[in-house]
Amino acid sequence: MSKFGCTPRWLTILRELHDGMTAKVIIGGQESDPFEVLAGVKQGCVLAPVIFNLFLVAVTLVFRNELSADCGIPFKYRLDGSMFNLRRLQAQTKVSTDTVHELQYADDAALVLYFIN
């Protein structure tokens, strides 16, 4: 997170929120002894999605920097209300082209390794 510009003070605050975290497991009404949580973020923590998104951005940036130019899934689109009109996509005006390198949804991500011939 320091590579994203987080100050040392902010990183210290985050560490203090998560260091020394303990948990218990309840099975069949019986509670386990407390144990230290060594990975992950607190469930229900409002910072958890932010921390996860920063991690995901870092992973996808590293992934994209290592890709060759011919990787990904190319697609054409237009934003004038004719997105699915294939005849209008053949015209070069108002048509944009982009490439998909990763697919993300909620807490899932798929990195695309499709090579264009």
Image: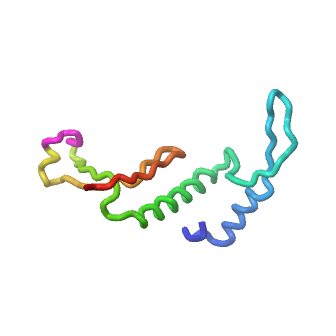
Q: Position of residue 112 (x, y in %)?
A: 40, 52
**What residue appears at the point 69 percent right and 70 percent down from the top-left corner?**
9
Left or right, residue 25 beside residue 83: right
The magenta span reads: 82-87
Q: Position of residue 25 (x, y in %)?
A: 79, 38
Which of the pair 23/71 is nearer the observer? 71
Q: Position of residue 74 (x, y in %)?
A: 28, 53
Quadrant of the rendering where the N terminus is positioned: bottom right
Which of the pair 112/20 is nearer the observer? 112
**What residue appears at the point 74 percent right and 54 percent down from the top-left corner?**
38
The residue most toward the front is 117
**What residue appears at the point 51 percent right and 45 percent down from the top-left corner?**
108
- Quadrant position of residue 8: bottom right
Report the predominant secondary structure element of the magenta stretch: loop
Q: Is residue 52 magenta?
A: no
Left or right, residue 72 beside residue 93: right
Q: Is residue 41 above or below residue 14?
A: above
